[in-house]
Image (tube, grey):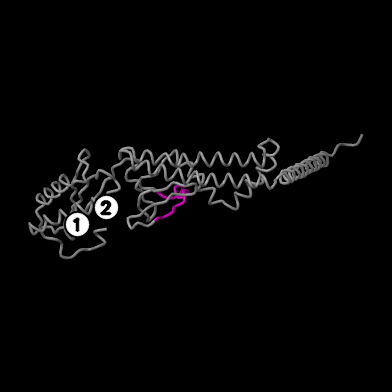
Amino acid sequence: MNPINFDTFSLNIFEFSYFVLAQSSDNLVQESGEQTKEILTKITTWKISQALIVLVITYMTIKLADKLIIWLSEQVAKEWRLRIKQFLPFLRMMVLTITIIFLMNLFLNLSRQNLVAVTGTVAVALGFAFKDYVSSIIAGVVGLFEAPYRVGDRIQIEDFYGEVIGYGLRGIRLQTPEDNIVTIPHNKIWTNAVSNANMGALEAQVISEFYFSHEVDVELVKKILYRVAYTSKYTYLKLPILVIIEAKSWGTLFKLKSYPLDARDEFIYKTDLTTRAKRVFGKYNLPYPRLMNMEDIQ
């Protein structure tokens, strides 16, 4: 009786298993290719026409919904304005989801075999071709539930600050104080900090800074700033008003922290506070710093 060579026996088993797996993979690829080819042959001119009609209807629906909701938000009481605008991203996502499901059912019939045959190929192709776009879409969906920003919020991402006026599939549209429209992709939330001034609320804190020399009468300046804030027609008096004082090498820095009735009036409010405060400062001839170190101020 010849002894059994276990190394040779194990090698034969491995080669046989590899051959079976390779043949199974080839069969699966061939079968998937045939199913994909069969699906593509069923694409007719009528189906393409239906898809184009659906895409046009979807586009018009989204545009009409945008205009309708924005118009409605400006007609109701201002306490409801942001809540109505924040419903817009969910409505857009719902319309797009229904459209995608309809198109998939139109061309793929959404059967198990069709999904297995096509989904993998399409997912890999889209993953490589539209990696950043897909990342932005996923971040946008996550953002709907985590809500780092919503329509109507005043946010800062990197060097851009302004009001969120649009929440799209790929990114948001930000209106800056210079009245520029900046489009920022949603995937910025993966790597960048998002500073939100009002988080869905109607009010946002405004900080107005005033600079004086060390010899200034601190109590007088504080009294003037409090009076200016409390008598402004833009001030929301139910929220706190605070004056912060910081000693700098060049003089004294005063920060007036207060809230406007509406966050969209941020810059009008700040201008009103500064104009009225400087008018009173001029009457008292309050001393300003003669020489400032701008790096210290910043």
Spot the residue most to the right. Answer: 1
Residue farthest to the bottom, as pictured: 291
Q: Is residue 40 above or below residue 295?
A: above
Residue 203's spot in the image, x, y percent?
A: 28, 42
Secondary structure under tag 1 reads: loop
Label 1 neighbour load within 10 Å: few <14, some 14-19, many 20+: some
Q: Quadrant of the N terminus?
A: top right
Q: Residue 180 carries which label?
A: none
What residue did someone put label 2 on? 267
Q: Indicate the amino acid at tag 1.
A: Lys
Q: Decide which of 264, 188 is in the foreground and name it.
A: 264
Q: In which quarter of the image is residue 20?
A: top right
Q: Which sits in the foreground, 178 or 249?
A: 178
For the image shown, how many numbered marks are present on the structure? 2
Q: Neighbour class for label 2 at 10 Å: few (<14), some, many (≥20)?
A: few
Please name the residue shown 41% across and 55% down the image: 182
Q: Position of residue 23 (x, y in %)?
A: 79, 43
**Which residues make up the magenta segment?**
181-193
Tag shown at residue 248: 1
Residue at point 44% right, 45% down? 66
In the foreground, 165 or 211: 165
Membership of 187 in magenta stretch: yes
